[in-house]
Image: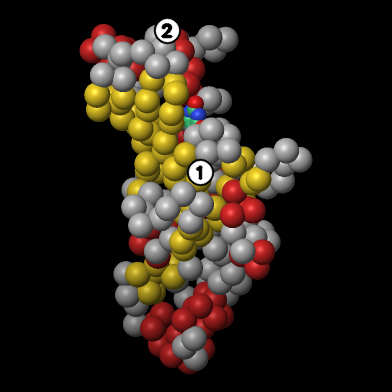
Amino acid sequence: MRLDYFLAHSTGLSRKDVKQLISRGAVAVDGEARPRASTRLHPGQGVWLHGEPVQLPGHRYLMLHKPGGVVCSTDDPDHRTVLDLLPGAERPGLHVAGRLDLDTTGLVLLTSDGQWSHRLTAPGRRCAKRYRVTCADPVTEADLRLLREGIPLRGEDRPTLPAAAESLGERSLRLTLHEGRYHQVKRMLAALGNKVVALHREQIGEIALDPALAPGQYRALTDHEVASIAP
Ligand code: URA
């Protein structure tokens, strides 16, 4: 899509006004030193007007407070899915960016923008994911040190990447990971001989679960939150 057409669509301004803004340098586009009205935008390319991100029309970005017992896939024969928690009109085209296990609660991001969710989940990006973890047995200082340094997981060649681990009590901790391996938190604690009894995701990158959202509730991400997952 042409830049002037995209901006007119997303801001409601006339093509003439948009062209003036572009020629005055009020518009920035990723990877384009001097965007012109005729510049062609590619999917996932960011556009800023007066320093504020402008979203490609049609893309939607939501945060949801996932309750336990709900799956993150888009359909499931046995369980309710996170999409079932949204009104029918919201659902088409949405997918989950970074799944949680059935029993894990907390922040889930849903979007129609495949490029954006790829940026969240691509291993090379090392996007931080912060969890509150409750364990069956006490977590020692030595355990925290091992979690911070990286630990071997059963059946894998590479140890986990260094993580941030902070005690929240005898059996609970806050763990921030920069990768997303299968059941990673549970497997890390299992490698220490412990067992996760409750797991809650608090934050992904700079996007924190809104405390105003009760389990099962959702809201649209702000432009700032969307733009924080930078191209
Ligand atoms: N790690 C896990 O073990 N489970 C989750 O749901 C998320 C991270």
At label 2, the amino acid type is Gly
Circle count: 2
Confirm whether residue 30 shows in the render. Answer: no
The percent coordinates of residue 144 (x first, y second) are 28, 16
The percent coordinates of residue 7 (x first, y second) are 49, 78
Is the residue marked by circle 1 packed among few (<14), some (14-19), or many (20+) residues within 10 Å? many
The percent coordinates of residue 6 (x first, y second) are 54, 76
Which residue in the protein does label 1 denote? 67
Label located before the other in sequence (1 or 2)? 1
Residue found at x 40% / y 65%? 223
Instruction: For mark 1, give the secondary structure.
Output: loop
The relative height of residue 56 versus residue 141 in the rendered view (above or below) is below
222 and 107: which is toward the camera? 107
Residue found at x 72% / y 41%? 76
Look at the numbered discs 1 and 2 and tell me whether their residues touch, using CB distance below 8 Å: no
Residue 193 circle label = 2
At label 1, the amino acid type is Pro
